[in-house]
């Protein structure tokens, strides 16, 4: 749901709900980066923001988490441009690029970069890093589950013993992260890391959490990229870490790869994330009107 910005900074407030089609569960805790890709164009189409020239910069507040994002949308002749040559692995066709820059996203759900207070924890006998950058995520080496890390989503989804172990770890991690009982929540998410096999920075499998993502979530990608840049995490030894900022991180996933640009600094307190950037696309599929009785919502 989109509305006019309410905090004095944002042009648009973006409120997200994740719905489980299997059991009707609705979770308002997370945000979604892939849906976020369409927020800028939709805000322009809805008249919440006016075009500013050939490109329009739109300041977005993710209401669920408080994250601030700047989206840059192509608007030649005052119209949203959807057609273009930018391709996204896992997305059919090509379209115009939409640049997203995420700011103030550390501790978005838990209030801390490392919600357990540790760079690594041992949970259910498995070494994990629990990190909160845009999306709170429990991060583990694939090899610690006896996996190579290049398994397909179908292979992983068929391995119910694996999912039982993941869920037990995720629930305990959620409690340690200060998130309470997460057994009915889609957060924290879960990510498996392994060395790259096709020239990327590293490879990952991401869980939503009860099903394997067929590619990679935008929010999850930025948390995983931050993890591999942070010294001492479970990612140590899986890759040669970039040594300068901004760092271009290419994450291999089941449908190809996704690139994340991380601006960071190494301080006396360790790794400090400054911003995370990514390029996505969107296309207009349909529009319509939803009528709500005034007795339900006075606005």
Image: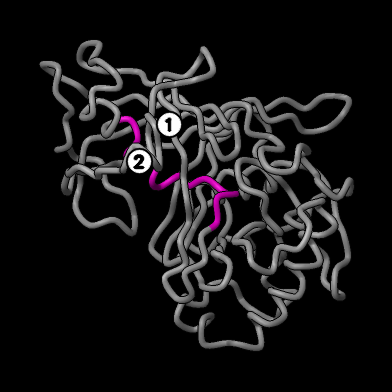
Magenta residues, start to end: 27-40
Furthest-front residue in this view: 295
Q: What is the x, y in percent for residue 182?
A: 71, 63
The N terminus - image quarter: top left
Relative to 32, is 126 on the left or the right?
A: right
Secondary structure type for disc 2:
strand
Instruction: Identify which residue, 10 or 74, lies in the foreground.
Output: 10
Q: Is residue 162 left or right of residue 222?
A: right
Q: Which mark is residue 280?
A: 2
Q: Marks 1 and 2: in contact by CB < 8 Å? A: yes
Q: Position of residue 120 (x, y in %)?
A: 85, 55
Give the side of residue 110 with respect to residue 42, left or right. right
Q: Nearer the viewer, residue 176 or 255?
A: 176
Residue 287 lies, with reference to residue 262, above or below; the image says: below
Picture coordinates of residue 209 (x, y %)?
Answer: 58, 67
How many labels, in total?
2
Q: Could you tell me which residue is drawn at 60 percent across and 41 percent down?
A: 134
* Location of residue 89 by image quarter: bottom left
284 w.r.t. 47: above or below = below
Please name the residue shown 26% across and 18% down the image.
55
Mark 2 vs 1, N-terminal side: 1
**Whole-percent x and y of residue 168?**
75, 75
Q: Quadrant of residue 103?
A: top right
Q: Residue at x 47, y 61 (%)?
A: 253
Density class for disc 2 (Cα within 10 Å; few <14, some 14-19, many ≥20) is many
Whether the magenta-drawn stretch holds residue 83 is answered as: no
| Residue 208 numbered mark, or none | none
Q: Is residue 227 above or below residue 269?
A: below
Q: Is residue 281 above or below residue 214?
A: above
Query: Would you name the residue on which mark 1 appears?
Result: 100
Quarter in which the C terminus is drawn:
top left
Determine whether the residue tagged by mark 1 lies in a helix, strand or loop.
strand
């Amino acid at each position: 749901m989109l509305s006019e910005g309410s905090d004095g900074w944002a042009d648009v407030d973006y409120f997200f709900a994740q719905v489980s089609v299997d059991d009707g569960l609705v979770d308002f805790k997370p945000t979604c980066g892939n849906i976020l890709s369409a927020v800028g164009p939709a805000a322009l189409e809805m008249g919440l923001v006016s075009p500013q020239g050939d490109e329009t910069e739109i300041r977005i507040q993710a209401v669920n988490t408080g994250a601030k994002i700047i989206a840059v949308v192509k608007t030649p002749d005052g119209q949203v441009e959807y057609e273009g040559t930018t391709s996204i692995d896992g997305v059919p066709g090509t379209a115009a690029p939409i640049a997203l820059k995420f700011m103030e996203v550390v501790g978005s759900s838990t209030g801390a970069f490392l919600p357990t207070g540790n760079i690594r924890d041992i949970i259910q006998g498995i070494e994990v890093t629990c990190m909160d950058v845009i999306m709170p995520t429990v991060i583990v080496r694939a090899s610690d589950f006896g996996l190579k890390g290049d398994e397909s989503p179908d292979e992983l989804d068929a391995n119910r013993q694996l999912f039982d172990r993941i869920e037990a770890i995720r629930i305990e991690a959620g409690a340690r992260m200060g998130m309470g009982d997460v057994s009915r929540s889609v957060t924290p998410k879960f990510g498996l890391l392994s060395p790259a096999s096709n020239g990327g920075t590293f490879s990952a499998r991401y869980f939503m959490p009860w099903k394997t993502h067929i590619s990679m979530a935008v929010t999850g990608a930025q948390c995983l990229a931050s993890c591999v840049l942070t010294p001492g995490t479970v990612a140590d030894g899986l890759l040669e870490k970039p040594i300068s900022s901004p760092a271009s991180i290419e994450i291999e996933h089941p449908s190809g790869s996704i690139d994340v640009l991380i601006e960071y600094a190494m301080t006396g307190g360790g790794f400090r994330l400054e911003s995370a950037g990514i390029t996505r696309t969107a296309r207009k599929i349909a529009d319509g009107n939803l009528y709500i009785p005034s007795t339900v919502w006075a606005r």
